[in-house]
Image (cartoon, grey):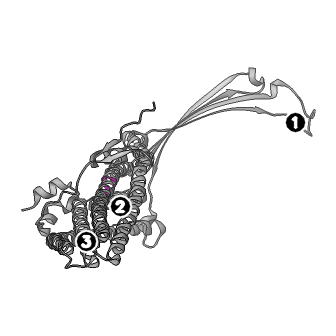
């Protein structure tokens, strides 16, 4: 007997955990992060001297003069040398700080990518929950239509209703069957795509555990902006970009205007003629101290001077980008807060519409049983009841997604958002 594995219970937190663990994009980004971390942890490499070694063999003989070409080991000499060069450049400090800043920026980008993926998975999870609830609504509507069909069949056999009423009930039941099958297929397809995002097989048996729980939020946009604007990832990144450009300007200024010192040492040894490889060994050691004083950048219009000028302009543009990012962020937060307030009003109206539709259907069904209401009217009110329930689900899902969007815009989680509300 073949045993069937129990389906996996999938909560939103479990879904997020699987997505973060199996995301190929995050894995690639983590590789880049490790590389930046390695560079930040080895800043001393900027001070490490250049070391070169050389080994060589030389052979010398006349060709067309004297005794002509001679093949003798005495004409073969060897050389060996080693060089050491250390450049003390005043731009080393900003270069090191740029490397460290690159790691900090990469770390922030990686953490933000994880948050964005978590938000995407949560939204997809709640969309599936809404689809599942709609599927349950359609199943209930199908059950109502089947019960009505049985009643109409019995009444038709007993001569209490006409053939047209019976056929209409039959058509209504078949329509609800078709609507349910279509919704069921759509749900299965979307669930399979969602499982692939989590790194699972598309046909993995799962049970979604959760509901669309919403709480009314009276979001004060200006208070939220004051408290959380500076923690937004895009604003942090824009400020770090300004810092990077300022360090880059320091590097260019120091490279173009501040003297640099180069220390060098070189050792060279080898055999000397006559005697070839077996001849007398001789060597020499030399050292150098070089002071370089750049002057070009002090003259307006030169390439070095234009490089410094361009660096200043890049900083000005980055500051304008920061201002634009802040304005767009504040606009987005205000818009989301306003939409949240308006969306709650839509939910309250949708709840009233559901209550009215349910009561209308109850009264219509009673009238139909008493022969005072036609089957088409009953079917129409049943469809309106289903539509009202589905609309309520759509409004609740939209509210939930706006909550996630606002939380993301403030770089906090949903729980912190609710606690920050007055």
Write down the residue under mark 3: 382
Write down the residue under mark 1: 62
Q: Do the residues labelled 3 and 1 touch (CB within 8 Å)?
A: no
In this picture, residue 43 sits left or right of residue 392: right
The residue positioned 42% from the left and 52% from the top of the image is: 192
Write down the residue under mark 2: 245
**In the image, is residue 118 part of the stretch drawn in magenta?**
yes
Q: Is the magenta stretch mostly helix, strand or loop?
A: helix
Q: Residue lying at the far top in this picture: please name it.
A: 278
**Residue 9 in picture, x, y percent from top left:** 31, 43
Q: Can residue 338 be seen in this view?
A: no
**In the image, is residue 318 part of the stretch drawn in magenta?**
no
Q: Mark 3, mark 1: which one is toward the viewer?
A: 3
- Label 1 SS: loop
Quadrant housing residue 353: bottom left
Q: Is residue 177 visible?
A: yes
Q: Quote the CA–CA distance across marks 2 and 3.
A: 65 Å
On screen, residue 75 above or below 113: above
**Residue 201 in picture, x, y percent from top left:** 45, 45
Q: Bin the neighbour count of mark 3 within 10 Å (Cα to Cα): few under 14, some 14-19, many 20 and up.
A: many
In this picture, residue 100 sits left or right of residue 385: right
Magenta-tinted stretch: 115-119
**Residue 332 in picture, x, y percent from top left:** 24, 70
């Amino acid at each position: 007997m073949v045993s069937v594995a129990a389906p996996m219970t999938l909560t939103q937190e479990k879904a997020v955990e699987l997505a973060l663990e199996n995301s190929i994009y995050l894995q690639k980004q983590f590789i880049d992060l490790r590389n930046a971390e390695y560079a930040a942890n080895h800043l001393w490499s900027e001070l490490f001297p250049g070391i070169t070694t050389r080994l060589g063999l030389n052979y010398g003989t006349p060709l067309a003069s004297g005794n002509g070409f001679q093949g003798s080991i005495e004409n073969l000499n060897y050389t060996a040398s080693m060089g050491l060069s250390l450049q003390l450049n005043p731009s080393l400090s900003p270069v090191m700080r740029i490397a460290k800043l690159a790691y900090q920026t990469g770390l922030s980008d990686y953490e933000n990518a994880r948050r964005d993926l978590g938000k995407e998975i949560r939204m997809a999870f709640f969309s599936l929950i809404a689809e599942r609830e709609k599927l349950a609504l359609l199943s209930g509507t199908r059950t109502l239509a089947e019960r009505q069909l049985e009643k109409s069949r019995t009444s038709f056999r007993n001569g209490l209703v006409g053939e047209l009423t019976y056929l209409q009930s039959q058509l209504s039941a078949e329509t609800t069957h078709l609507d349910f099958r279509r919704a069921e297929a759509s749900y299965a397809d979307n669930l399979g795509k969602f499982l692939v995002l989590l790194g699972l097989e598309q046909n993995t048996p799962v049970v979604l555990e959760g509901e669309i729980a919403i709480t009314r939020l009276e979001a004060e946009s200006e208070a939220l902006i004051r408290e959380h604007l500076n923690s937004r990832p895009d604003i942090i990144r824009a400020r770090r970009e300004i810092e990077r450009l300022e360090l880059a300007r320091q590097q260019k200024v120091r490279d173009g205007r501040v003297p640099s010192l180069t220390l060098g040492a070189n050792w060279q040894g080898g055999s000397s003629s006559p005697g070839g490889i077996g001849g007398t060994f001789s060597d020499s050691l030399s050292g150098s101290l070089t002071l370089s004083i750049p002057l070009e950048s002090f003259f307006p219009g030169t390439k070095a001077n234009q490089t410094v000028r361009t660096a200043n302009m890049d900083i000005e543009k980055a500051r304008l980008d920061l201002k634009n990012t802040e304005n767009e962020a504040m606009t987005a937060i205000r818009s989301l807060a306003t939409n949240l307030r308006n969306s709650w009003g839509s939910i309250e109206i949708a709840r009233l519409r559901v209550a009215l539709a349910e009561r209308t259907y109850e009264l219509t069904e009673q009238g139909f049983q008493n022969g005072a209401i036609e089957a088409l009217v009953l079917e129409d009110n049943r469809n309106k009841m289903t539509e009202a329930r589905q609309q309520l689900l759509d409004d609740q899902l939209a509210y939930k997604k706006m909550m996630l969007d606002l939380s993301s815009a403030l770089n906090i989680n949903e729980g912190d958002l609710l606690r920050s509300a007055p």
